[in-house]
Amino acid sequence: MSYELIGLLMFSSMLVMLLTGQRVFGVIGFVATAFALLLWGVGGVEMPFSAAFKLFNWYPLLTLPLFIYMGYMLSESGLASDLYRAFHVWFGPLRGGLAIGTIGLMMVISAMNGLSVAGMAIGASIALPEMLKRGYDKVMITGVVQAGSSLGILVPPSVVLVLYGMIARQPVGQLWLAGVFSGLLLAGLFVLYIAIRCRLNPELGPSLPPAERQLPLAEKLKLLHTGILPLLIFFAMTGLFLMGVTSLVESSAVGAAATTLVALGKRRLTRPVLEDTLNKSLGISCMFMWIILAALCFGAVFDGLGAVKAIESLFIERWLLSPWAVLIMMQVSYLVMGMFLDDTAMLVIVAPLYVPLIVALGFDPIWYGVLYTITCQVAYMTPPFGYNLFLMRAMVPPEISLLDIYRSITPFVLVMCLAIVLVMMFPQIALWLPQQYYGG
C-alpha cells in the first residue's frame, strides 16, 4: 500500500469516527496512535509520544487559560452591560441603531476576550432581549448577534490566532496586527448592510422613542466613560505587548488581572462569581489542551508518512492545479468541515497539512491565517449543521425558532464571503499593518 493511500485512509478514518459523535481529541489521538503502531510496530508509539511533549514546551500556551479567564470575568463584571447602555443611547436615534450598536459592542468585547462563544453569549443575553423589546425584526437581530460574535476570533487578542501561530510557527504579534484591519473591514461591512437594509425597510429596526434617547448631554458624555475601561484594558494588554514592554504571556496576565480589578472595583468579585469563572475557564482550557495534544500526535504520524509532499505533488504535478485553485479547494474543505467541527478542531486537524503547502505554493502564512479565521467562521454559521447555529439556538428565547436562525444568517454569510474575496484580492488589507510595524 502506497504512503499516499495510507495517508488518505488515515484522514478518512478520522472523519468517519468523528461522525459517531465521539470526542474530537479522543478520535484524533486514537487514529494517530493506532496507525503509528500498525506502521512502525511498538517503536512507533515514540512518534506521537515525543510530539505530545512539544505541548509542555510551548510556553505561549499559558496565554489560553488567561485569555479565557479574562473573557468570562469580563462578562461577570457587568462591563458589557455598561457598554451596551452607552451604545443604546448614542446609536438609538438611527434606524437599526441598536443593531449597529450591538456590532460595536461585540467589536469591543472581541478586543478584550478573543473568543466568539463569549461574544455570542454576551450578545444573546444583553443585546438581543433589548432589541426584541423595542420591536426589532427577530430574524435580522439574530443574525446580527451571530455575525458580531465572529469578530471574536479575528480581532486581537484572538485565541484562535494564538493557536494558529503556535501550530503554524508564525509570530503571534504579526497575526494579531493582520487581524486588525481585516476585523474592521468585516465590522464595517456588517454595519453598512444593517444601515442600508433598515433604511430601505424601517420596520426591521425602528429608532428609539424620544423619551429614551433625549438625555442631557452631560449624561450622554458620562455614559461614554464606560468606554474608557475597555480601552485601558486593551492598551494594557495588546498595546504593551506590541510596544515590546511585555511578552505574550505577560500581556495575557495583565489582561486577566485588569478585568479582575474591574470586577473588584464594581463590587462584583464575589466568591460564587470567582468560582464560576475559574470552573468555566478550567473546562474550556482543558478542552483546548486535549485537542492540541491529540492534533500534535496526529500531525507527527501524518507528516512521517510524507503526506504533505504527496498531496503537494498530487495537486501541482499530477492535477496541474494553479496555486489559487489549490487555495480555493482548501477554503471549500473548511466550509465542509465546519458543518461538524468547531474552529479549533479544524485548525489542529488540517494546519499541519495545509500550512506547509501554503508556504510551498508561495503564499504568506500570516495572510492565510486571516483567511482561515474568516472562512472557518463562515463554515460553522452555515446550515444545516453549523456549530454556531445550534449554540445560538440554546441561547435565544423560545419565540426564535431554529428556522429563524437559519434564515437570519444568510445575508451575513454573504457579507463575510465578500470580505474573504476582498482579503484574497487585496492581501495588503491583512499584511500592511504587520509589515509597517515589523519593518516588512
Image (spheres, rainbow, N blue to C red):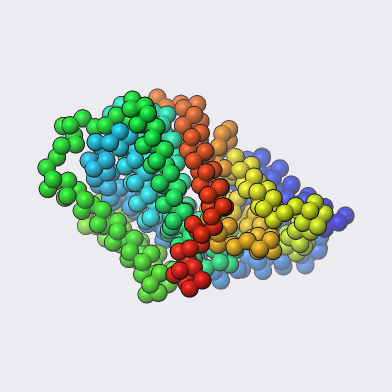
Which of the pair 370/125 is nearer the observer?
A: 370
Which of the pair 25/165 is nearer the observer?
A: 165
Q: Classify 205 as above or below 104.
A: above
Residue 404 at x, y percent in the picture: 46, 27
Which residue shows up at 61% across the image and 43% down it? 335
Which residue shows up at 22% across the image and 40% down it? 89
Q: Is residue 16 left or right of residue 79?
A: right
Q: Classify 287 as above or below 91.
A: below
Quadrant for residue 91, please give it.
Answer: top left
Which of the pair 106/298 is nearer the observer?
A: 106
User: Does residue 193 appear anywhere in the picture?
Assistant: yes
Q: Is residue 71 left or right of residue 173?
A: left
Which residue shows up at 52% across the image and 43% down it? 418
User: Does residue 81 appear anywhere in the picture?
Assistant: no
Residue 83 at x, y percent in the picture: 27, 47
Which residue shows up at 56% across the image and 34% down it? 383
